[in-house]
């Protein structure tokens, strides 16, 4: 990638993160990405959560990078009205990061890190009953996958969302469903 492009970054806890809009601008303006396309697909959507996959294809239509994201409506104040939009933005940012755009310090974007910090600051640890409920819903969510890639994507989304919440035993049981 061109060494002349200067990404605008956001400082979060002493580390610079590139915002998604900066990654999109790079994809749309840098000559090495001429003819590339960016698409998104909703893999799961219900009134409480969504999973979106972003795909980047080169000028010949070959997939060169993908990124997935999962958001819950209840996870933050902004997600109460915009969880689908935030999910799409995160998926796009991750796909662009996997393509190599704006990853000088991290695949994560400023938006993702900011949301994660907000969740940490406002989330209370779940009770044992709610952990069991999360596990049951995760089982149902994986089983609802139509094929192995879909079930694997669902399992990955659960891992991302509940990392540090579900036990290793629970995650192992979920993995076996894939």
Image (cartoon, rainbow, N blue to C red):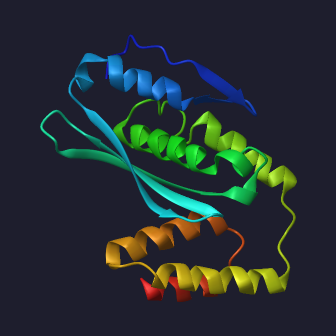
Q: Residue at x 55, y 60 (%)?
A: 50
Q: Position of residue 84 (x, y in %)?
A: 57, 50
125 vs 154, left or right, is right
Q: Is residue 118 in sight in this rendering?
A: yes
Q: Residue furthest left?
A: 60
Q: Is residue 163 in sight in this rendering?
A: no
Q: Which residue is drawn at 66% across and 68% down?
A: 162
Between residue 93 and residue 107, name the one nearer to us.
Answer: 93
121 vs 141, left or right, is right
Q: In this view, does 45 lie above or below 111?
A: below
142 vs 86, left or right, is left
Q: Position of residue 48 (x, y in %)?
A: 66, 64
Q: In this view, does 174 lie above or below 19?
A: below
Q: Which residue is drawn at 17% across and 45% down?
A: 62
Q: Position of residue 150 (x, y in %)?
A: 38, 72
Q: Quadrant of residue 39?
A: top left
Q: In this view, does 25 lie above or below 158?
A: above
Quadrant, the C terminus = bottom left
Q: Residue at x 47, y 85 (%)?
A: 143
Q: Quadrant of residue 163?
A: bottom right
Q: Where is residue 161 in the image (x, y as percent from the top left)?
A: 63, 64
Quadrant, the N terminus = top left
Total numbered labels? 0
């Amino acid at each position: 990638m061109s060494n002349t492009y200067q990404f605008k970054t956001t400082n979060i806890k002493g580390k610079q993160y590139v915002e998604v809009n900066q990654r999109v601008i790079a994809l749309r303006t840098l000559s090495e990405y001429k003819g590339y396309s960016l698409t998104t697909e909703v893999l799961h959507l219900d009134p409480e959560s969504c999973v979106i996959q972003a795909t980047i294809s080169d000028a010949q239509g070959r997939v060169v990078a993908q990124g997935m994201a999962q958001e819950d409506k209840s996870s933050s104040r902004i997600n109460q009205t915009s969880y689908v939009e935030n999910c799409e933005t995160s998926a796009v940012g991750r796909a662009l990061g996997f393509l190599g755009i704006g990853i000088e310090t991290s695949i994560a974007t400023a938006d993702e890190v900011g949301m994660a910090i907000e969740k940490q600051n406002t989330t209370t640890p779940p009770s044992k009953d709610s952990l069991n409920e999360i596990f049951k819903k995760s089982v149902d969510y994986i089983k609802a996958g139509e094929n192995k890639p879909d079930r694997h994507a669902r399992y990955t989304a659960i891992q991302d969302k509940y990392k540090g919440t579900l036990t290793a035993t629970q995650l192992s049981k979920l993995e076996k469903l894939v």
